[in-house]
Amino acid sequence: MTRWRREREKGTLSGLEPKKRGRKSELKHSWANKLTQLERDNARLRRELEKAEKIIEVQKKLSELFGLEKNHPGGNL
């Protein structure tokens, strides 16, 4: 009890200090989080692009194999 009183008088007890009200400032962390999220999205989109390019390449090869025209008048192959 005496130790608590001494700490209270010195002001070293942080539990008795008034706390800041309102929203916490997360500006530094929010930019870092945003950057991490954008890098993750960028990597995901690059993987999807690679898949799409491979599919298009296979479609081109199949088209050549079956002798279909590149610019088909109907539009869709």
Image: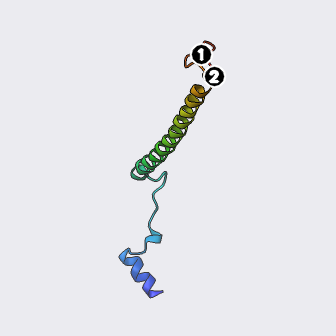
Query: Which is nearer the N-term, disc 1 or disc 2?
Result: 1
How far is disc 1 from disc 2 in space, using C-alphas? 7 Å
Q: Which residue is mark 2?
A: 77
Color encoding of the figure = rainbow
The label shown at residue 72 is 1
Position of residue 25 relative to residue 16, above or below, is: above
Position of residue 11 relative to residue 30, above or below, is: below
Q: Is disc 1 placed on a helix, strand or loop?
A: loop
Position of residue 17 relative to residue 43, above or below, is: below
Q: Residue at x 39, y 82 (%)?
A: 6
Please provide percent x and percent y for residue 77: 63, 22
Compare residues 75 and 42 and report the one nearer the observer: 75
Compare residues 6 and 65 and report the one nearer the observer: 65
Please provide percent x and percent y for residue 21: 48, 55
In the image, what residue type sits under mark 1? His
Q: How many marks?
A: 2
Q: Is disc 2 placed on a helix, strand or loop?
A: loop
Compare residues 26 and 6 and report the one nearer the observer: 26
Q: Residue furthest left?
A: 10
Please provide percent x and percent y for residue 68: 60, 21
In the image, what residue type sits under mark 2? Leu
Compare residues 16 and 32 and report the one nearer the observer: 32
Q: Residue at x 62, y 25 (%)?
A: 66
Mark 1 is surrounded, within 10 Å at the Cα level, by few (under 14), some (14 to 19) or many (20 or more) other residues, namely few
The label shown at residue 33 is none
- Asked whether the beta carbons under mark 1 and mark 2 sit within 8 Å of each other, the answer is yes
Mark 2 is surrounded, within 10 Å at the Cα level, by few (under 14), some (14 to 19) or many (20 or more) other residues, namely few
Position of residue 11 relative to residue 61, above or below, is: below
Please provide percent x and percent y for residue 59: 58, 30
